[in-house]
Each structure stands twice: as C-alpha cells, then as structure tokens.
C-alpha cells in the first residue's frame, strides 16, 4: 500500500477532473487508462482509445517521430516536450504537447497531454504573415512598367509545423509553453 493510500487520499479525483489529457499506456503500444479529457478533446470514447494501438490515432506524418519517442520512453528516458497530432472522431486533427515518464518495472508510461492546436494555428498564421511580408519586400515595381521578382527562399519554407522532439526542456519557437519548456527558433 502506498503512502497516499495509507493516508486515505483518493488520487482518482485528480485523474478524473484534470483539464489536461492524462493517460497510462503500456510498452505494448496501447492505452491502459485515459481520463475524460480525452473524450472532451478528441471525441473518441475511452473504450475506443483503449481498444486500438495509440499510434493508430497519430497523424501519418507524425508516426515515425511518435514511435521514436515511445522507444526512448521504453529504455527509461523521460519526455519533456513532444508535439504530435492526434485524430479526432470527426476526422480533424489536434496538436498535442506531451510530458511523460516510464515505469520500467511495470512497463507503463504515465503521460499528460495538452491540446495546443490554437497556439499552432497562431504560429502558422504568424509564419504565413512573415512570408507575405518577405515577398512583399522583394517585389520591385517601377512607374514606367511592371518589373517584379520573387525571392524564392521566401516560398521554400514549409508553413506546416512538423512534430518536434526536444530534450532538456527545450521546444519549438515561443519563449515559454504551458508546460514551462523553453522553445528554440526553427
């Protein structure tokens, strides 16, 4: 019996009432338990999330990075900030930021995920605005005619954010995230 159980604390209330998506997953690639925030955020029932490998909900472009992160957890590493996209019941995707730690003896992963979709969309809008400004600055017009050139490097940047794996508390490009992780410039 744990110290918490001996003192009569019921930690299930924390799990059930959290605004963040909490889960326990096995090293076998399946969720063992998810809290109600999963259904509120993604629309999938708890049972449907538990019945399928968790990678089946991951955006195809994020599967490889997600598997690598799970492998890191499987050898005892912690996840400080990891971002990927999960499929909602309606077919759309939500960006999630993860923090996780493994229990090597029980072959379980304890994780918290937060929906960061709004932040990602704002970053995408900011990136697009920056590209428009860069292109606008590269257009040269003359009064007598129309001469224009385009800075091709302004169009080469992919404006769709990719999953980001970070260690030692560093993530993508704002000063602080909701999990308190510093972010670096892309």
Image (cartoon, rainbow, N blue to C red):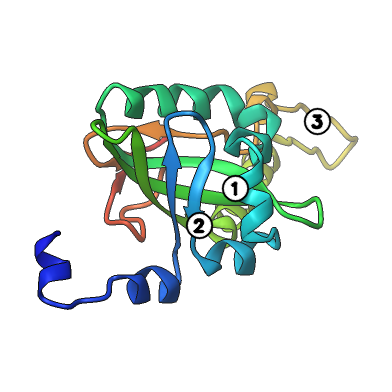
Mark 2, other Cα within 10 Å: few <14 / some 14–19 / many ≥20: many
Is 51 placed above or below 17 here?
above
The answer to whether mark 3 and mark 1 are in CB contact below 8 A is no
Report the residue at 63% width, 64% height from top. 39
Q: Earlier in the sequence, mark 3 or mark 1?
A: 1
Report if the CB atoms under discs 1 and 2 are less than 8 Å apart. yes
Q: Secondary structure at mark 1?
A: helix
> Disc 1 and disc 2: Cα gap in Å?
8 Å
Q: Nearer the viewer, mark 3 or mark 2?
A: 2
> Percent x, y for residue 166?
34, 33
Q: Which mark is residue 148?
A: 3
- Residue at the (69%, 29%) spot, across then down: 60
User: Camera-side residue: 175 or 152?
Assistant: 175
Q: Quadrant of residue 62?
A: top right
Q: Secondary structure at mark 3?
A: loop
**For the C terminus, which image quadrant?**
top left
Residue occupied by mark 2: 34
Sequence order check, earlier mark of 3 and 2: 2
Give me the residue at 43% from left, 28% from top. 70
Question: Which residue is depicted at the point 49% across and 28% down?
Answer: 28
* Position in image of residue 2 (x %, y %): 13, 60
Looking at marks 1 and 2 on the same chain, the residue that comes earlier in the sequence is marked by 2
According to the picture, the residue beneath numbered tag 1 turns out to be 50
């Amino acid at each position: 019996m744990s110290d918490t159980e001996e003192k009569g604390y019921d930690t299930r209330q924390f799990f059930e009432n959290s605004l963040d998506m909490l889960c326990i997953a096995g090293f076998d690639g399946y969720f063992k338990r998810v809290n109600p925030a999963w259904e509120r955020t993604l629309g999938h029932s708890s049972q449907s999330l538990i019945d399928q490998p968790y990678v089946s909900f991951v955006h195809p472009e994020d599967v490889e990075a997600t598997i690598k992160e799970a492998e890191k957890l499987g050898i005892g590493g912690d996840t400080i900030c990891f971002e990927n996209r999960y499929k909602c019941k309606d077919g759309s995707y939500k960006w999630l930021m993860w923090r996780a730690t493994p229990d090597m003896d029980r072959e379980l992963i304890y994780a918290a995920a937060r929906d960061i979709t709004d932040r990602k969309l704002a970053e995408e809008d900011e990136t697009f605005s920056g590209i428009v400004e860069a292109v606008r600055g590269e257009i040269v017009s003359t009064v007598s005619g129309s001469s224009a050139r385009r800075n091709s490097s302004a169009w080469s940047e992919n404006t769709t954010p990719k999953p980001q794996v970070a260690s030692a508390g560093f993530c993508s490009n704002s000063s602080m995230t909701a999990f308190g992780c510093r972010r670096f410039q892309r």
